[in-house]
Amino acid sequence: MTTTTAQLIDGKAIAKEVRSELRARVETLRANGVTPRLAAVLVGDDPASQVYVGTKERTAKKMGIDSEVIRKPATTTDAELRDLIAELNARRDLHGYIIQSPLPTGLDEAAMVELIDPAKDIDGFHPVNMGALTLGYPRMQPCTPAGIVELLVRSNVDTSGAEIVVLGRGNIVGRPISILLSLKGKHGDGTVTVCHSRTRNIEAHCKRADILILAMGRPEMITGDMVKPGATVIDVGVNRVDDPSTEKGYRLVGDAHFDSVAQVAGAITPVPGGVGPMTVAMLMANTVTAAERAE
Ligand code: NAP
């Protein structure tokens, strides 16, 4: 039997806290006659995307945010999607929207994101928003990195001067979180190392990290012997592994081997129930911010 020594960073509870604070801002907007509204564009019938969009829609409704899902067939053309984006940019009643990734083959995701009005880009993926973040005055922050910062702040993990190692340099998580945590000032000031698939001796980097952020999508790759005692481990990875003992035939695991890492780390996020709920909460935060700015 394993013993867990690490403090569990409960993303579900922290996301609930964030949502309840946001609800007060939603109430103020509504009292002024403004209902924040978001939309999700879903092209094709990717099953995971349907689940993600459903979660976002349900969360929005519970918070008093209006939400709509715009479903388009997988045969949607480049021109049709461009027209839809122009229409959404022009709509006064809509404060923000996302184009759910992945788009069907043949549609250029990066080109479509560039067409979104940056003020309505609640995913925070538009180059203007990414550029502002890099320059140190974030506007619409990408949701998962913003959620990680909230988790650290609300768990009293000080990033100033900390050795922070980020595993993964993807545009959605690894790259932006490494920038956010190295920015000068509050909630930043970390000494950040970014590792990726070409990094030599990942273990040596991991072992000196006060804060270890795992964003690779490699099931249970990081084990307890690779972690500095007392470190904070934020596990962003969401991986399906076969498990015939479960009803679905699989279970979700992170990039950390939870049982062994939890015996060494000072604090750790679980998968599921860690970073995931924060991502959705931050999407709601961006929607409320967009509505406040627009009105
Ligand atoms: P991504 O864009 O594919 O990036 C993965 C990164 O991991 C790449 O930089 C890659 O290196 C690096 N990598 C892969 N294998 C590695 C290895 N063996 N050693 C070191 N680095 C390695 O993926 P992503 O979109 O950032 O997603 C990463 C994970 O986070 C996935 O499991 C995803 O499901 C999860 N995720 C969770 C949430 C959430 O809300 N919980 C949100 C977004 C993503 P190269 O650059 O060299 O290829």
Image (spheres, rainbow, N blue to C red):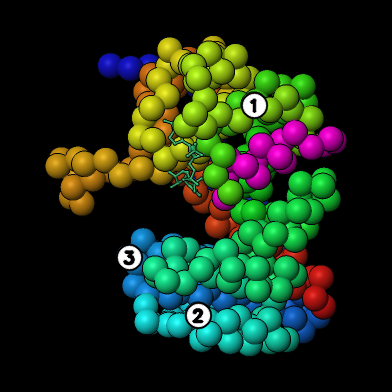
Within the magenta stretch, is there residue 179? yes
Within the magenta stretch, is there residue 126? no
Report how many numbered discs are placed on residues in the image.
3
Q: Is mark 1 within 8 Å of ligand 1?
A: no
**What amino acid is found at the position of numbered circle 2 in the picture?**
Asp
In the rendered structure, the answer to whether residue 22 lies left or right of residue 102 reads right
**What amino acid is found at the position of numbered circle 3 in the picture?**
Pro
Give the residue at mark 3: 47
Badge 2 element: helix
Query: What x and y, as percent, mark residue 290?
Result: 74, 69
- Locate the N terminus and report the quarter of the image it occupies: top left
Neighbour class for label 2 at 10 Å: few (<14), some, many (≥20)?
Answer: few
Q: State the residue at coordinates (82%, 78%).
A: 295
Q: Is residue 217 above or below residue 225?
A: below
Badge 3 element: helix
In the rendered structure, the answer to whether residue 31 lies left or right of residue 144 reads right
* Residue 233 quadrant: top right
Give the numbered dot on residue 193. Answer: 1
Query: What x and y, as percent, mark residue 258?
Result: 39, 27
Give the residue at mark 2: 78
Specify the segment rendered in magenta: 172-186
Q: Main secondary structure of the magenta part?
A: helix
Query: What x and y, as percent, mark residue 38?
Result: 61, 74
Q: Is mark 3 within 8 Å of ligand 1?
A: no
Q: State the residue at coordinates (49%, 29%).
A: 198
- Precedes in sequence: disc 3 or disc 2: 3
Dots 3, 2 in contact, CB < 8 A: no
Neighbour class for label 1 at 10 Å: few (<14), some, many (≥20)?
Answer: some
